[in-house]
Image: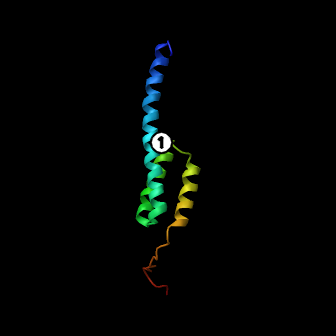
Amino acid sequence: MPIIRSAIKKVRKDKVREARNKKRADALKSLMKKVRTTKSAKDLQVVYSALDKAAKVKLIHPKKAARLKSRLSRGVSPQKYSLKRSAKKK
């Protein structure tokens, strides 16, 4: 157990941060698992947002977030997008 006051405070803060990070990581894992099972594009958008936020708060590395997004998108069936052209070329 630390004796110095700042070290005692650090232990307290670390405990809170660890709990917060664990909660975020568990939520992220459950979202990714949901996308893998349902394979819906709507869930994929939610996971993309969650992965970006996790990378922003340094929960995971930004390149890991990009890699996971790439791998998850491969499992989801592609949607047919209609291309709309605004004006014809003369």
Assign a secondary structure to mark 1: loop
Seen at 46% across and 14% down, the residue is 5
Question: Seen in the image, is 74 located left or right of residue 5?
Answer: right
Q: Position of residue 36 (x, y in %)?
A: 49, 61
**What residue is rendered at 47% in x and 23% in y?**
11
Query: Residue under circle 1?
Result: 57
x, y percentage for residue 64? Answer: 58, 50
Of 87 and 29, the residue lying toward us: 29
Give the vertical position of 37 relative to 23 (above or below): below
Q: Looking at the picture, which amino acid does disc 1 mark?
A: Val
Q: Please state the horizontal and vertical placement of residue 19, each as a whole percent of the image.
A: 43, 35
Q: Quadrant of residue 44?
A: bottom left
In the rendered image, the residue lying farthest to the front is 37
Could you tell me if residue 48 is visible in this image? Answer: no
| Category of crowding for the residue at label 1, using alpha-carbon neighbours closer than 10 angstroms: few (below 14), some (14–19), many (at least 20) | few
Q: Residue at x 45, y 48 (%)?
A: 53
Looking at the image, residue 7 lies above or below residue 71: above
